[in-house]
Image (tube, rainbow, N blue to C red):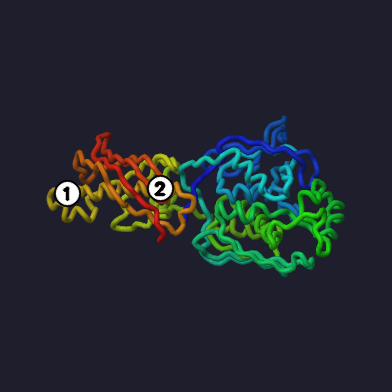
Amino acid sequence: MLWLQRTVDSSVTIEGLGLHSGKKACMTFAPGAPHSGIVFLVPGAGPDGAQVEIKAVVENVSAEKDLVRATTLTQGDVEIHTVEHVLAALSGCGITNCEITIEGGEPPVPACGSSLSYVEMIDEAGIREQGLPAMFYKISQPVKLKQRDVEITAEPAESFLITFQVQYDDPLIGFQELTIDLYPKSFREEIAPARTFAMMSDVDKLREMGLALGGSVENALVFDNGVIAGGLELRFPDECVRHKILDLIGDLALLGMPIQGHIRAKLSGHAANVDFTRILAKSERRMPRIYPPRNADYWDIGSIMEIMPHRYPFLLVDRIIELKPGKTVVGIKNVSINEPFFQGHFPGHPIMPAVLITEAMAQVGGVLLMSSVDDSRGKLVYFSGIDNARFRRPVTPGDQLRFELELIKLRGPICKMRGTAWVDGNLVAEADLLSTVVDR
């Protein structure tokens, strides 16, 4: 599975009250540069009124802070409280880079008490594809955390799955369990609408602790012996476990990259979630690369192999140097005398077969097509047609082929692309390609 870097396309602002502080708060999402991650900005909080930057990583969660009801990021004396719902929205929507300006010490609590308003902020701003693979954390072996009755484990998987169990005495909650395969559509529909909840017996205790001062029966579910205060109705019969999954997504986002694996949690809260994220962060953080890239602004062969099923001797693209999902792609194929086809085409006069030039062009186009579909898991690209093919010059060992493709039409699973191939600035081949996305 491959994650691409994404950011918001424009700035968008929301205002309101902080959930726990009850104070006026303002938050702005703004585009982030490739490789920058999620960064919180606090204007005027530094020396001489300087802006303070706090990267959303678990290393910036203070171990001294009480994480019972919220997750807090710190940088020196500067704190940002209750970041989990915002991070869950960004992570769930596939945003990997974003600048978040915070005024008031914590994000404004949405009127609906869930992450849905933050998702709507992202929709208003739009999503910008940045055309580069994102580093991700691949669970390669089981990891476990156990603290009394609380358990969190991670296991290898082909996508990002979460299984969560909760148990409460209130008859409207009781025992709930849910497993969900997380990607933007499932997050938006199944998790983002789930609201913050509390027991009525805990509300006064929270307020004595200086928490939940901005909470109310309008923006949170408050359970009182089988009744929901304020006459609110559940959005899902198991809304509570869905919100616990939302919290866990936000806390896991502090790893600083998407996760590939199956996370199982039992009775966990923010403190255990963050402890588990610390365990993951201490082990080697992984990325879709065989070796560290010389230049992080292109796709190396490891990244390509995450999205393309081809292998030796039929993987015919070495690097993607430019990608605008849904628009264009530029790829490189280095032609070596060691290519197996040169043994027979032709002995003593090696020339790359025109059909393989076309195949390499189609593979570069396949990266463009697979990065343009909403969910590429379990998908393949079939090369289904070719028109207007012309081969202008021979391609020989030592040449570097540069393929440039433009997506002309994408209708359902059918795609038409216009491709050209170049060597040293000279056009060597061109064709119109038809491709189809199919299930594996």
Front: mark 2 or 1: 2
Question: Image point 72% across, 38% down: which residue?
Answer: 15
Q: CA distance from mark 2 to mark 1?
A: 32 Å
Closer to the camera, 53 or 422?
A: 422
Q: Position of residue 19 (x, y in %)?
A: 77, 47
Can residue 290 be seen here?
no
Q: Earlier in the sequence, mark 2 or mark 1?
A: 1
Q: For this view, does 248 lie left or right of residue 212?
A: left
Instruction: Say few, some or many: other residues with alpha carbon within 10 Å of mark 1 (under 14 / 14 to 19 / 20 or more).
Output: some
Farthest residue, direction left: 348
Instruction: Say few, some or many: other residues with alpha carbon within 10 Å of mark 2 (under 14 / 14 to 19 / 20 or more).
Output: many
Q: Quadrant of residue 247?
A: bottom right
Q: Position of residue 354 (x, y in %)?
A: 21, 47
- Where is mark 1, residue-wise? 350
Closer to the camera, 398 or 359?
A: 359
Farthest residue, direction top: 48
Identity, as a three-letter code, of the amino acid under mark 2: Leu
Closer to the camera, 337 or 94?
A: 94
Q: Secondary structure at mark 1?
A: loop
Q: Quadrant of residue 8?
A: top right
- Where is mark 2, residue-wise? 369
Q: Would you say the residues marked 2 and 1 are in contact, meaning their CB atoms lie under 8 Å apart?
A: no
Residue 296 against residue 225 in the figure, above or below:
above
Identity, as a three-letter code, of the amino acid under mark 1: Pro
